[in-house]
Amino acid sequence: MPLTLAVEFIEPGVRLITLQRPQALNALTTQLLGELADELNAAQSDHNTHAVVITGSAKAFAAGADINEMAERNLVGILDDPRQASWQTLTRFSKPLIAAVNGFALGGGCELAMHADIIIAGEDARFGQPEINLGIMPGAGGTQRLLRAVGKSMAMQMVLTGEPISARQAQRSGLVSEVTQPEFTVERALHIAHSIATKAPLAVRLAKEALLKAMDTDLASGLRLERHAFTLLAGTRDRDEGIRAFQEKRRPAFTGE
Ligand code: CAA
């Protein structure tokens, strides 16, 4: 079977993953999710990869789970479903992940984008959870992550009506951080990824962990985690290098130690 995604190594330290099932608007099959999980595992264990950008095509980031595949499979045995393992890999990915979204990001496609730490959207992007139209509901974080991102009223409206929102609405709601002209979405995401890739890797990793923790913990526990991470970083070579570079008016050369 042909590969459903392409990977490019963008120097320095950035991987670009492009979903490639244009015939089905990048609908997420078991194969595609499996290949994506494999790529993220490879990026996770590669010391030279410091950030990953994921994108689709001009027409669709991803139009959701592949409905034809869903028609053939019974989702009752969801715990045995290999797609669940792939989603778990996305959830566990600890390096910065940026989604560059043009066109449709629907259902599992919207949920995929929400696994990213940062979403950059083209002006024509549409974000939605249309599962309700199929007689089902989101099942890969679409009720939990969406509500945390856009708040109760907008999340309820999107999930219960199935109607998508525009890139501008998504930005106003806090789902995406920037809206670009569609032809610059990937470029802008790569630029941000490159900027992050130049920072101290341990600081980036712990900052991501602390920020994600803020979504599912109480303030006191979150502050404890932050203090712990801050203290850990105080003992790193990169912290010394960062401060020395500032004083010497030069760019820091971080090593991840
Ligand atoms: N699964 C399988 N095939 C899909 C698909 C999907 N999710 N979305 C689009 N396609 C296919 C279409 O069937 C069509 O194929 P053919 O040319 O062979 O007919 C091709 O992609 C192009 O799509 P359209 O002709 O429909 O394009 P359009 O511009 O007229 O409409 C669209 C675009 C509004 C996104 C429409 O395709 C659509 O509504 N797609 C389904 C979106 C959806 O319901 N997603 C949620 C799926 S459930 C889910 O995601 C649950 C989960 O993860 C847990």
Image (cartoon, grey):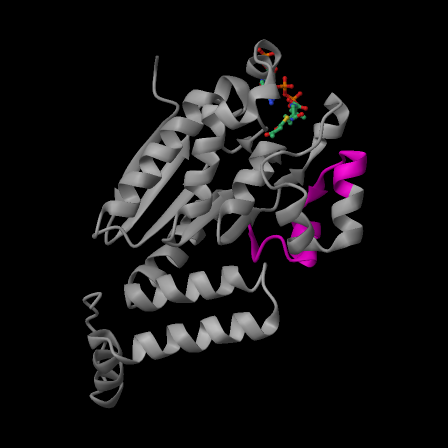
Q: How many marks?
A: 0
195 to the left or right of 242 = right
- The image shows residue 195, relative to residue 56, as above or below, that is below
218 to the left or right of 37 = right
* Quarter of image, ligand 1: top right
* Residue 70 picture location, percent across and down: 59, 16
Depth check: 209 or 154 in front?
209
Find residue 151 and report its image quarter: bottom right
* Residue 205 picture location, percent across and down: 36, 61
Residue drawn at the location 53% of the way across and 24% of the way down: 27
Magenta stretch holds residue 145: no
Report if residue 66 is visible in the image.
Answer: no
Residue drawn at the location 74% of the way across and 47% of the way down: 155
Q: Quadrant of the C terminus?
A: bottom left
Magenta stretch holds residue 164: yes
Q: Residue furthest top?
A: 72
Residue drawn at the location 78% of the way across and 45% of the way down: 156
Find residue 221 and report its image quarter: bottom right
3 to the left or right of 216 = left
Q: Quadrant of the N terminus?
A: top left
What is the span of residues highlighted in magenta in the rendered image?
158-180
Residue drawn at the location 53% of the way across and 19% of the way down: 24
- The image shows residue 236, relative to residue 37, as above or below, that is below
- The image shows residue 189, relative to residue 31, as above or below, that is below
Depth check: 28 or 220 in front?
220
* Residue 208 picture location, percent across and down: 43, 61
Depth check: 44 or 9 in front?
44
* Residue 144 picture location, percent across and down: 65, 47
Depth check: 163 or 227 in front?
227
- The image shows residue 170, relative to residue 16, as above or below, that is below
Report if residue 73 is visible in the image.
Answer: yes
